[in-house]
Amino acid sequence: MARPVVGIIGNSYTINDRYPAHAGGTINSAAVAEVADCVPLIIPSDPRYVSVAELMEVCDGFVLTGGRPNVHPEEYGETPTEAHGAFDRARDAISLPLVRACVARGQPFLGICRGFQEVNVALGGTLHPEIRDLPGRVNHRMPPDGTVEEQFALRHKVRFQPGGVFHRLMGAVEVMTNTLHGQGVIAAGRDIVIDGWAHDGTPEALYVRGAPGFTLSVQWHPEWNAAADPVSRPLFTAFGDAVRDWARTGRAPLRQMA
């Protein structure tokens, strides 16, 4: 049987300051191919080229990747400010309705960093533009200096809800993760269950209550060192299992959500 296809939401870039491109990090493709055991397919996330309906027919599951541009605050009822950073309205126009459609249909997705935030916003939640500015919070941003390995190094603990979905998946109530984000979830959207938090209370893991498919999403970057990391590997393995179940049956397995 051919491996199922996972659509990786691409980001818009400008190469050499003049050539527009859609691209995805190699570590996303590696995690999908080597750990989830699926075929990675980079998606040009722009409604001029693809529709949500087409993507859901072509792909069996989706990875909602991280990315430098943020979800536009108008998507959660706020006015944009300089603190909100750069935006990608074309990606918003694909990712947000894709999340809602996958939740309704039971088609699996894994949200990562910006993707974690997209899942929350798609279901009516809100974000804060700069988590480190909130009382009691720390700086979750990527270190500006150092090697890529140093920037993606494990930097803080995430504690899961005891007995919750992530605790059962990881086999531990507390794990170490990297952290490379500036924005964060403030109010959870409808049916969003926050299932893990950083030591300062920042939401780090979620799923959609009652969704028939795989909806696990995390604020950190599990695609880094996914094959060897004891936290990343079970997450991508479970996602791959859900995608294969979908590809075989066209529906999510009943065990996916509790």
Image (cartoon, helix red, strand yellow):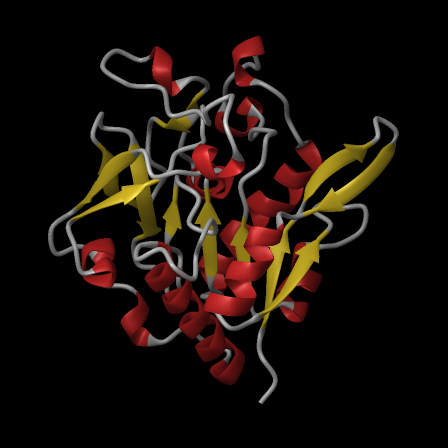
Q: Position of residue 24 (x, y in %)?
A: 65, 48
To which quarter of the image does residue 154 belong? top left
Compared with 127, 176 (above or below) is below
Tell me what residue is drawn at x 67 percent, y 31 percent: 88
Q: Position of residue 180 (x, y in %)?
A: 45, 32
The residue sitting at the front extreme is 147
The residue sitting at the left extreme is 162
Compared with 128, 191 (above or below) is below
The residue sitting at the right extreme is 18
To which quarter of the image does residue 216 belong? bottom left
In the image, is 207 to the left or to the right of 163? right
Tell me what residue is drawn at x 64 percent, y 26 percent: 87
Tell me what residue is drawn at x 54 percent, y 29 percent: 75
Tell me what residue is drawn at x 50 percent, y 27 percent: 146
In the image, is 210 to the left or to the right of 101? left
Between residues 38 and 105, which one lies in front from this camera angle?
38
Report whether residue 41 is seen. yes
Image quarter in which the C terminus is found: bottom left
In the image, is 21 to the left or to the right of 187? right
Q: Position of residue 82 (x, y in %)?
A: 58, 10
